Image (tube, rainbow, N blue to C red):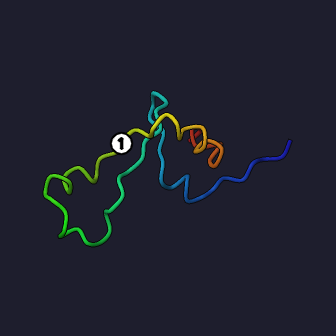
Amino acid sequence: MPKVKTHKSTSKRFRVTGTGKLMRTRQGKSHFRRNRSARLLADLPEMHEVDKTQVKRIHKLAPYLDKK
């Protein structure tokens, strides 16, 4: 059976933890940051868990994501 191509932008946006959780970064980190509150800006760098309804879709786009 041939290999499945990975959607490259998906593989760059998501990471899998050691326990198998799919993590993502927040949006809005690039420009217009001066309009946002300090509390929101402090939360931007940290990773957040992906919603359970989206996990299957992301694994279809990046099937080898968890094997890094």
Residue 35's spot in the image, x, y percent? 19, 68
Q: Residue furthest top?
A: 19
Q: Nearer the viewer, residue 36 or 20?
A: 36
> Which residue does the image show at 66% across and 53% down from the upper left?
6
Whether residue 27 is situated above or below residue 23 in the rendered picture:
below
Would you identify the image quadrant in which residue 32 lies? bottom left
> Which residue does the image show at 47% across and 44% down from the upper left?
15
Q: Residues within 10 Å of mark 1 (few under 14, many from 20)?
A: some
Say which quadrant the N terminus sits in: top right
Q: Which residue is mark 1?
A: 48
Say which quadrant the C terminus sits in: top right
Residue 63's spot in the image, x, y percent? 65, 43
Whether residue 13 is situated above or below residue 36 in the rendered picture:
above
> Which residue does the image show at 49% across and 30% down from the upper left?
20
Left or right: 18, with 56 as reference point: left
> Which residue does the image show at 28% across and 52% down from the upper left?
45
Q: Residue furthest left?
A: 38
Residue 47's spot in the image, x, y percent? 34, 45
Whether residue 52 is situated above or below residue 39 in the rendered picture:
above
